[in-house]
Amino acid sequence: MNTPVKMRTAEIGVIGAGSWGTALAIQLARAGQKPALWGREPEVIKALTEKRCNTVFLPDIPLPDNLAIEPNLEHLVARNRDLLVCVPSHVFRQVLESIRPHLQKNVRIAWATKGFELSSGKLPHQVAHETLGIEVPLAVVSGPTFAREVGLGLPTAMTVAATNADFADELAWRFSGKNFRAYTSTDMVGVEVGGAVKNVLAIATGMSDGLGFGANTRVALITRGLAEMTRLGIALGANADTFSGLSGMGDLVLTCTDDQSRNRRMGLALAAGKSVDETCAEIGQVVEGVKAAAAVHKVAHDLGVEMPICEQAYRILYEGAAAQEAVAALMQREVKSED
C-alpha cells in the first residue's frame, strides 16, 4: 500500500471519551494524526482540557499535544470528514441520529462499538446503513485490545474491516505506528459478530473461574464458544476464516482470560454472589456482555442457530438460573461430533 505521507496530518473526530475512545484518540495522535475528541460527560471533558488526562477512565496517561479536545459535538462533526464512533452499542443508533444533520457531504464513518442492537438484533453496520444511508463509507475497528494498554503504547494489533478496501487500508495505515499494527478485512459481519459474542462468553468463563471449575473448563468454554461464534457468523453471512483471526479467536481469548476485561469481572462477581447492578456500579463502566447476552439470544433463536454456552449465560443473567444448573445442562447434552 503506497499511502501519501501527507495523510499523517489528516484530521479525524473521535466521538466518545470513555476509556476506549480516549485510548484510540491517543493512538491516532501517537501515529501522527491530528484527532479531536468529544465526550458527553462534562467532568471528563473538563479533566481532558485542564489536566490533559482522562482522570476518570484512563488516569495517569497523558494526552499527546496533537490531540485536541472538542466540547461541542456539532463542531466536531462539521469540521471532520472522518469520524470514529466509540460508544456502547445500546446508544449507537441514537448517536448516529444526533450527528446526521451536521455531517459533511463526503463523510466517512468508522466505529469501535461492539454488539448487536438489542431492540432489533441488527449489527452496527446495519444500523449505520439505516440511519445514514448506503452511500456513506463505513468501517469497524475491533480486535484483542484493552484500552489501558493501547493508551500506554504497549505493542498491540487489531483489525479494521470495511467493504471498501481502500477505506480499510487508509484507516489501518493511520492507526499504525511503532507499537501498533492494524490488519485489514472486508468481512464487516464477521468482525462485528466476533466483537459481540465474545463478551457473552467472557461472562460465562468468568463465572466458571469464579466457581473454581478449573483450567479444563475454561479452555472448553473458549474453544466451544469459538464454535458458537463461528456458527452464528456464518448464518449471518460472515467468512468462517475471520473467526480464527484477531477479531475472533484473538479477542475471545483476551476477554475470557484477563481480569482487565469488564465482562470477565462480571462473571467472577456473579460467581461470588453479587448482582448484575451491584457489579456494574463497582466497575463504573458499561459491561457490554450483559445486554449482548439478550441480543445474541434473540438473534440465535430467530436464525435457529444452536449456541448452548451463550444460552446458559442468558439463563443465568435473565432467568435466575444457578451456575451449577447451567453447567449440568451443558454437560448432559447428547454426544455428537465436534465437527
Image: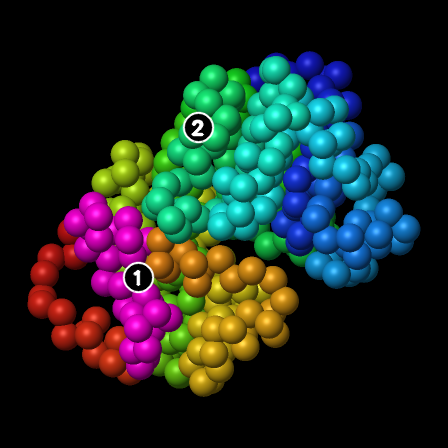
Q: Is residue 182 left or right of residue 154?
A: left
The kind of residue tagged 1 is Cys
Residue receiving disc 1 = 310
Residue receiving disc 2 = 129
Q: Do the residues labelled 2 and 1 touch (CB within 8 Å)?
A: no
Residue for point 39% across, 83% down: 211
Residue for point 40% across, 56% down: 292
Q: Residue 284: give x, y in percent of width and height.
A: 63, 67
First along the sequence among labels 2 and 1:
2
Image quadrant occupied by the N terminus: top right
Front residue of 86 and 333: 86
Front residue of 58 and 135: 135
Q: Dividing the picture into quarters, in which one does residue 223 lie?
A: bottom left
Q: Residue 191: give x, y in percent of width and height.
A: 42, 40
Q: Residue 45: give x, y in percent of width and height.
A: 79, 49
Residue for point 50% across, 26% down: 132
Q: Does the rendering let one see residue 289?
A: yes
Q: Is residue 83 left or right of residue 292?
A: right
For the record, the magenta segment spans: 296-323
Q: Is residue 315 magenta?
A: yes
Give the dominant element type of the magenta stretch: helix, strand or loop. helix
Q: Is residue 9 magenta?
A: no
Q: Dividing the picture into quarters, in which one does residue 313 lie?
A: bottom left
Secondary structure at badge 2 equals helix
The kind of residue tagged 2 is His
Residue for point 27% across, 34% down: 237
The residues tagged by marks 2 and 1 sit, at their Cα atoms, a distance apart of 28 Å
Q: Dividing the picture into quarters, in which one does residue 19 lie?
A: bottom right
Q: In this view, does 54 lie to the left or right of 101?
A: right
Secondary structure at badge 1 equals helix
In the rendered image of this protein, does residue 300 appear above or below residue 184? Answer: below
